């Protein structure tokens, strides 16, 4: 399938599991993918595998984001980069960690959107943005005061961006995944006392895979979703439907 032929799509967090799977899906469907990481070296492997083009920038630096994006012929964006922060209660949270989580997950995604949409409007062919949010913005999860707050902010960025950019033919949506059981997440979610009760409450009773998330991301980017904008799509095995 080549339904993204001629369309350049920037994917942040491309060295990660969901980001890498998204790059693979888009490359298979003919997209010209720009794979973004903190450095070009970080995304070298996924670029070698898929033919994506590398770019590096720090999501905390507006100057680096501007320099990396300005002048590119962009059609789409996947804001997939994220930082998990800590597991903490409101009374115990480390505000410096909270600030870092908000900087990457909300502020960084907004800055990428700010500069990417300027180029998308300049190109004048419409386009689509998908923000990778979390089930933690839809339901309260113990210990997720920082992460959940950052993703709730990202969902609002999605809705307001959809409202503002519709006149330019640019759609903006979020996906809200449950846990993808990677080594990074296993330290917490893999604990028997956490995993068992959580999965018992989920109708599908399993963790998501990276492809479970990448597929809906690509759908929301595609013309098959041409009338969908401003939504936050749970990919959580039914957990938030409880």
Image: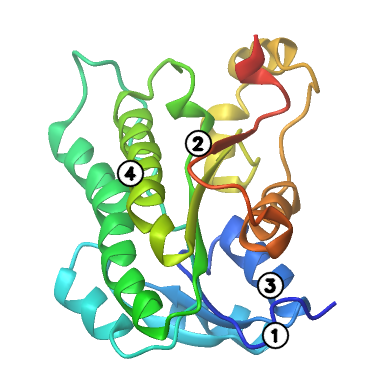
x, y (%) of residue 42? 46, 77
Cα distance between the residues tagged 3 and 4? 26 Å
First reached walking from the N terminus: tag 3 or tag 4: 3
Disc 4 target residue: 160
Residue 93 falls in which quadrant of the image? top left
Quadrant position of the C terminus in the picture: top right
Cα distance between the residues tagged 2 and 4? 18 Å
Mark 1: few/some/many CA within 10 Å (<14, 14-19, 20+) = few
Disc 3 target residue: 26
Near-viewer residue (188 or 79): 79
Q: Which mark is drawn over residue 134?
A: 2
Mark 4: few/some/many CA within 10 Å (<14, 14-19, 20+) = few
First reached walking from the N terminus: tag 1 or tag 2: 1
First reached walking from the N terminus: tag 1 or tag 4: 1
Residue 109 in view (yes/no) = yes
Cα distance between the residues tagged 3 and 2? 21 Å
Comparing marks 2 and 4, which lies closer to the viewer? 4
First reached walking from the N terminus: tag 2 or tag 4: 2
Disc 1 target residue: 5
């Amino acid at each position: 399938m080549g339904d993204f032929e001629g369309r350049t799509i920037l994917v942040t967090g491309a060295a990660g599991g969901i980001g890498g799977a998204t790059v693979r899906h888009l490359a298979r469907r003919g997209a010209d993918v720009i794979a973004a990481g903190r450095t070009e070296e970080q995304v070298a492997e996924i670029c070698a595998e898929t033919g994506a083009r590398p770019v590096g920038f720090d999501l905390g630096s507006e100057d680096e984001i501007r320099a990396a994006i300005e002048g590119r012929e962009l059609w789409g964006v996947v804001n997939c980069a994220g930082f998990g922060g800590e597991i903490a209660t409101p009374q115990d949270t480390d505000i410096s960690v909270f600030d870092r989580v908000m900087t990457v997950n909300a502020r960084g995604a907004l800055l990428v959107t700010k500069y990417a949409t300027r180029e998308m409007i300049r190109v004048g062919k419409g386009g689509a943005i998908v923000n990778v949010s979390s089930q933690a913005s839809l339901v309260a999860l113990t210990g997720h005061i920082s992460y959940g707050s950052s993703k709730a902010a990202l969902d609002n960025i999605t809705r307001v961006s959809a409202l503002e950019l519709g006149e330019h033919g640019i759609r903006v949506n979020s996906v809200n995944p449950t846990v993808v059981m990677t080594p990074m997440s296993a330290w917490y979610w893999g604990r028997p006392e956490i995993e068992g009760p959580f999965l018992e409450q989920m109708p599908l009773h399993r963790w998501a895979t990276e492809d479970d998330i990448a597929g809906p991301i690509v759908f929301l980017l595609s013309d098959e979703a041409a009338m969908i904008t401003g939504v936050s799509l749970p990919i959580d095995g039914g957990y938030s439907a409880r």
